Image (spheres, rainbow, N blue to C red):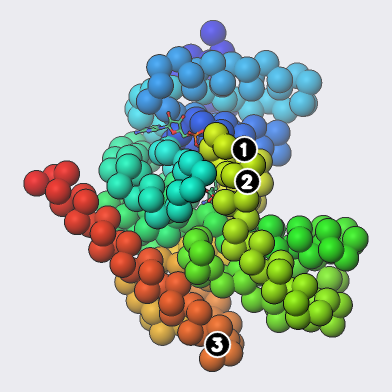
Amino acid sequence: MVSSPSSPILCNSPRVTIVGAGRVGSTLAQRIAEKNLADVVLLDIVAGMPQGLALDLMEARGIELHNRQIIGTNNYADTSNSAIVVITAGFPRKPGMSRDDLLKVNAKIVVAAAKNAIAFSPNAILIVVTNPLDVMTYLAKQATNLPRDRVMGMAGVLDSARFETFVALELGVLPADVKAIVLGSHGDLMVPLPRYATVNGIPVTELLDQATIERMLARTRNGGAEIVELMQTGGAFFAPASAASVMVESILLNQSRLLPVATYLQGEYGLENVVIGVPCRLGCGGIESVLELTLSDGEKAALQASAQSVRQNIHRAQEILADVQG
Ligand SMILES: NC(=O)c1ccc[n+]([C@@H]2O[C@H](COP(=O)([O-])OP(=O)(O)OC[C@H]3O[C@@H](n4cnc5c(N)ncnc54)[C@H](O)[C@@H]3O)[C@@H](O)[C@H]2O)c1
Ligand SMILES: O=C(O)C[C@H](O)C(=O)O
């Protein structure tokens, strides 16, 4: 009964739709409900699966002490009036693949998901998770024609959390005391910035030698692949769901958190008409502002290279989509 799409939604409760009720999507639904942030609509193409997950999550409410509604559906009409739509629909990579190898299979899924979801929630803020992340975020923006403050991708929060984790493990300090930032694309050319990484304000460059830092940067760049290789079936989902939930939280609670977010650049960092990760303030309107950090020549060059690889893949994706349409 409770998982039926026609179940009543609590008055004045914000609603978050998650398109793709797989591992990332279902874990994100759990995080959002258990953090008591919003009601959740889980949508998937597989019949019965999102309904089953929603019922399971609803049955945990009394134990987890929250009263959020979780609805499972295969129908976009049930997602209407969502404040936020998160797109996790699509294929994860297999061992040996790069994220870019998913471009062909995921491009049309993301474009259709973005268009369908925004048709029923025209005021929603869109957060893309599906890989290859930066290209998919660009396609979602293009397909919906939403302003850039309302379309963004999740990757930098995850990549930064991985870098922070490796620093915390190396130094034996509390993970929450480590702060780091990773910019650029969510791929091999991501741009971690060790000189901005600190342990409670102390730069990690004071605490670790260069060789150790380089080893951590390489592990951060390879962070997703490391898990794909270990699991053999699909990729990471606990930390990705946590990272997406932080973005959802900052928007719903208007926290104005300054987070690395994949956004459409309009001249910032000397880049335009491309999506890559840069520090953004996230509040109730979505991306409130983009912060332009002062970068060294080497960091600027790394960001340019990262953007260039995304541009090439945007071009490939557009050719693929044109073939599908034509
Ligand atoms: N940006 C990041 O940092 C990050 C992190 C983790 C995963 N990802 C990506 O997120 C995506 C999902 O990963 P996952 O581990 O949850 O995969 P998964 O296979 O567990 O889930 C994907 C879900 O999408 C559904 N789906 C497929 N086509 C659909 C459509 N047209 N409409 C609605 N639903 C559809 C599938 O049925 C499946 O349930 C992958 O592309 C993965 O690479 C990105
Ligand atoms: O690596 C992947 O394929 C999934 C995701 O992008 C990740 O970084 O965990």
Q: Find out whether the residues at labels 2 and 3 contact each other: C-beta distance under 8 Å.
A: no
Residue 320: image x %, image y %? 21, 51
Residue 282, quarter of picture = bottom right
In the image, farthest residue toward the top:
1
Q: Residue at x 77, y 26 (%)?
A: 65
Given residues 180 and 284, the one toward you in this image is: 180
**Distance of mark 1 from mark 2, alpha carbons?**
6 Å
Q: Amino acid at mark 3?
A: Gly
Q: Residue at x 89, y 62 (%)?
A: 173
**Distance of mark 1 from mark 3, alpha carbons?**
35 Å
Q: Find out whether the residues at labels 1 and 3 contact each other: C-beta distance under 8 Å.
A: no
Q: Is residue 316 above or below residue 231?
A: below
* First along the sequence among labels 1 and 3: 1
In the drawing, does residue 317 fall left or right of residue 106?
left
Which residue is identified by label 2? Answer: 227
Q: Find out whether the residues at labels 1 and 2 contact each other: C-beta distance under 8 Å.
A: yes
Which residue is identified by label 1? Answer: 231
Q: Residue at x 47, y 43 (%)?
A: 93
Residue 268: image x %, image y %? 44, 80
Q: Which mark is residue 298?
A: 3
Mark 1 or 3: the one toward you: 1
Given residues 141 and 109, the one toward you in this image is: 109
**Distance of mark 2 from mark 3, alpha carbons?**
29 Å
Given residues 84 and 294, the one toward you in this image is: 294
Q: Amino acid at mark 2?
A: Ile
